[in-house]
Amino acid sequence: MEDHGYAYSVLEKLSFNRVAGTEDEKKAAQLLLSEIEQAGGKGELMEFPIPASTVTQEGMRIVSPYAREVETIGYGRSGSLPEGGKTLKFYYAERGVAEDYVGMDDLSDTAVMVNSISYEAYRLLCEKHAAAFIVMRGFHYDTLETANAYRKNLGDEKIRLGRIPGFMISAKDATEMVRDGVETVHLTLVQNEFEATSRNVLAVIPGTEYPEESIALTAHYDSVPVGKGAHDNASGAAALMHIYRHFLQNPPKRTLRFIWCGAEEGGLFGSQAYIERNKALMPQIRLCFNFDMCGTTLGENHISVTGGEALKHFTEQFCREVGRSSVVRARVQSSDSAVFADHGVPAIAISRYADSADYHVHSDVLFPLGAEQLYRDAEFAVRYIERVANSVVLPLDKTIPDDLKKELEKYFDRDKIKNNG
Ligand SMILES: [Zn+2]
């Protein structure tokens, strides 16, 4: 009775670059809305603002001991250097911890390169008034293109500490610069910030017996700026549409709230906006079911349980019952479900990964995904949700264990923010 090719047909339609805040993301939202309508349901778009920036000038030139241009991508929302750029000392601080800056308290004339820009590394750079930061992308043989580098925005938690203009360069250039003893570089970065608009696509299937109790079903449909985002996460968005169609025909006892989230990449803005606008609903939402990446022909199934033992046991038992091999772990999944868990809603996050199918890369295209596997993943979710939504007593408590609460604090960088006042 179920159409095995339906989810894949949605996936095919959605397989184009869908960066948050762009016309492409809007087009994807409208596509999802029309699928809801074609199924005979009713959906709506929920718009929300997201921080954005346009970089108008960027670049790096080695000044001494020799001269050459270096390809860069500037960080969005990291501020601008004075018009015309600035010549700065170049210093490689490796991990960017205190030991990497012995005797260096004032870095206001220095561009500091670190291996990665963690919250802690950024905080130290702010403390020392660094003029710019540089990070490298990829392996030693990579260019920015082969490293799949793309513009990222500096996160709010770092911006709260101050703005330091940031740059990405290839690991190949970074290797050469340190090896050749580069002393000074000329950096340019000019950008302006504005608010862009993203949107969630919403649909509700009211429960037939316990309509006041609900389950939130989430999958983000935006993508990063490289690749077609077929695996991440057109696959999950398409699977969610399969689930929606099923329950529209077979209404469950509890209410299902479908949320195709916009702007997940780079900030989980869609789920945050949803919760912000639906505070009154939150006590009714008993569980969040999130789909982020599925449908790869090769691969293995993972389920992250951000909830108590009862939910984890139920999930493991259910996987045995239906014969689905899954790695089930109590953990925080880096996706929209984390935001729900952070607001006290236990979450189940389903993913299917393959070592042979990377994501956030140019090669996130349709090829590694298959119609039959996508159908299997979506049908597993249908059966799982059916069991939960129709059970007389829910197989879970609405609690988040303390260790997972700690993991959430860490995930949202609040543990460090607290420690540093
Ligand atoms: Zn994703």
Image (tube, grey):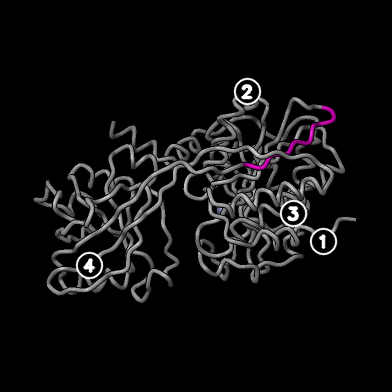
Q: Which residue corresponds to the image point at 36% horizontal and 76% vertical from the top-left?
A: 141
Identify the amino acid type marked 3. Ala
Q: Which residue is mark 4?
A: 61
Mark 2 and mark 4 in contact? Answer it, CB < 8 Å.
Answer: no
Residue interval drawn in magenta: 200-209
Q: Is mark 1 within 8 Å of ligand 1?
A: no
Residue 280, disc:
2
The amino acid type found where label 2 is placed reads Ala
Q: Which residue is mark 3?
A: 378
Viewer-proximal residue, 143 or 99?
A: 143
Q: Position of residue 147 (x, y in %)?
A: 42, 69
Q: Is ligand 1 less than 8 Å from the beta carbon at label 2?
A: no
Total numbered labels: 4
Q: Could you say whether the residue bearing mark 1 is in a helix, strand or loop?
A: loop
Percent position of residue 277, x then y: 59, 29
For the residues labelled 2 and 4, the Cα–Cα distance comes to 54 Å
